[in-house]
Amino acid sequence: MAFDHETIFTMEATPVKYGAGSSQDAGWECRRLGVKRVMLVTDPGVAALGHPERIKRLIEHEGIEVVVYDRARVEPTIGSVQDAAAFALEHEVDGFVSVGGGSSIDTAKVANLVFTHPAPVMDYVNPPVGGGKKPPAPLKPHLAIPTTSGTGSEATTVAVLDIPEIKLKTGISHRRLRPTQAIVDPELTRSLPAQVTSSTGLDVICHAAESFLSQPFDARPRPESPDDRPPYQGANPIADVWSAKALELGGRYLRRAVADCDDIEARGYMMLAATMAGVGFGSAGVHIPHACAYPIASLKHEYQPPGYPGDHPFVPHGHSVIVTAPAALRFTYDAMPERHHHVAGLLAGEPIPDADADTLPDILRRLMKDIDAPRGIAELGYTEDDVPGLVDGALKQERLLAVAPKPVGAEDLRHIIAASMSNW
């Protein structure tokens, strides 16, 4: 039986161990994975908090050797991930443990990829920017232990990186990048500054909303080979469950998590929402706000985010995504009005009578205001003169724009980005 359009979707997910104190099981999990010498990847800010050292001792207690790489860069670059890969090759490890936010987890993913299947990083970067090379076999075991409640990288197939030479942020995406096991421990977020909780939490909201509002999986042409099915498949019944629950939790707990670092209930549910959204968008995909976010984060490096450690200017990923989300989801409204209404109701905590095209954008703007997010692209250092460059960078994110629920071209992106200079 022949079909012109896709009839199949795939659901895969990282096994997740969740709960307060679950990071105590790090050594046990490493032993279960059969590793003997692991590379623990973290960044200087997380290292200073002491979490990586504690986890290192837990792993060593199981008789496993640990070499620590604490140079992961917040918002990784192609140079920083190549440095991590070289470190892994130098130390001849047989597994990876990442402790930190999405940047540390993504750095471990790429180091694992290049260590297991040596090749220049650009060979693996998504086309049209890179070669799009597919790893020919599974990678080494990777235990991911997030310390933030946002990226969901512990559950996804993607690693995001910046290529400063061409002023473009992009990624590597393949099912084999997904970590082998994740430990999600809300206790690790107590020391997270409010601004970081705000940005990462808004990333959760965008992951879940974009996934739920993506092109249906069966709208795509059927591929010639199962190997050609993209990791981002479009909205499907299973991904919808994960994304919807993440939206519900985000609407209920994000404001509380930002307001009080000791509100472990709220921060715990935001960590759970991040993982759930990661499973959802890891299957369905993200689209316009993320496509716009990559050039927003890479075209200029002038913004110094408050509350973030480190001395290099950058735009936190969640903030680069959320600033265009109101305009982007206003643009996609007519492709699936009822699903937009549903997302708005999930974030609001109740159905919204007489919802229209502006309801969801207005809810997002109120949330941004309440947790002190940047009001728009202009606050991140951009002017109207930068719009053409931002549009060009967004157009290069072909794998993301392909998941949008309606066709999006250069003029559409220009309107979205210009409207997002200031959201209020």
Image: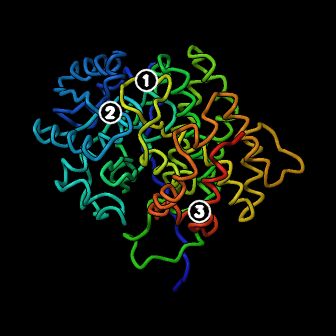
> Which mark is first along the chain, 3 or 1?
1
> Which mark is first along the chain, 2 or 3?
2
Q: Secondary structure at mark 1?
A: helix
Cα gap from disc 2 to disc 1, whole angstroms: 15 Å
Q: Amino acid at mark 2?
A: Ser
Mark yes or no: residue 236 visible: no
Q: Are marks 2 and 1 in contact (CB under 8 Å)?
A: no
Cα gap from disc 1 to disc 3, whole angstroms: 37 Å
Residue at the spot 61% in from the left edge and 65% down from the top edge:
216
Query: Which residue reaches farthest front?
Result: 385
Q: Secondary structure at mark 3?
A: loop
> Which mark is first along the chain, 1 or 2?
1
For residue 64, side relative to residue 301 (left or right): left
Residue 22, labelled with which disc? Answer: 1
Q: Are marks 3 and 2 in contact (CB under 8 Å)?
A: no
Relative vertical location of residue 130 with respect to residue 309 in this rendering, above or below: below
What percent of the width, then of the height, locates residue 382?
53, 44
Front label number (2 vs 1): 2
For residue 29, side relative to residue 344 (left or right): left
For residue 392, side relative to residue 249 (left or right): left
Front label number (1 vs 3): 3
Mark yes or no: residue 423 visible: yes
Q: Amino acid at mark 3?
A: Ala
The front one of 155 and 368 is: 368
Q: Which residue is mark 2?
A: 98
Residue 404, labelled with which disc? Answer: 3
Residue at the spot 54% in from the left edge and 83% down from the top edge:
4
What percent of the width, then of the height, locates residue 154?
42, 40
The image quadrant where one finds the C terminus is top right
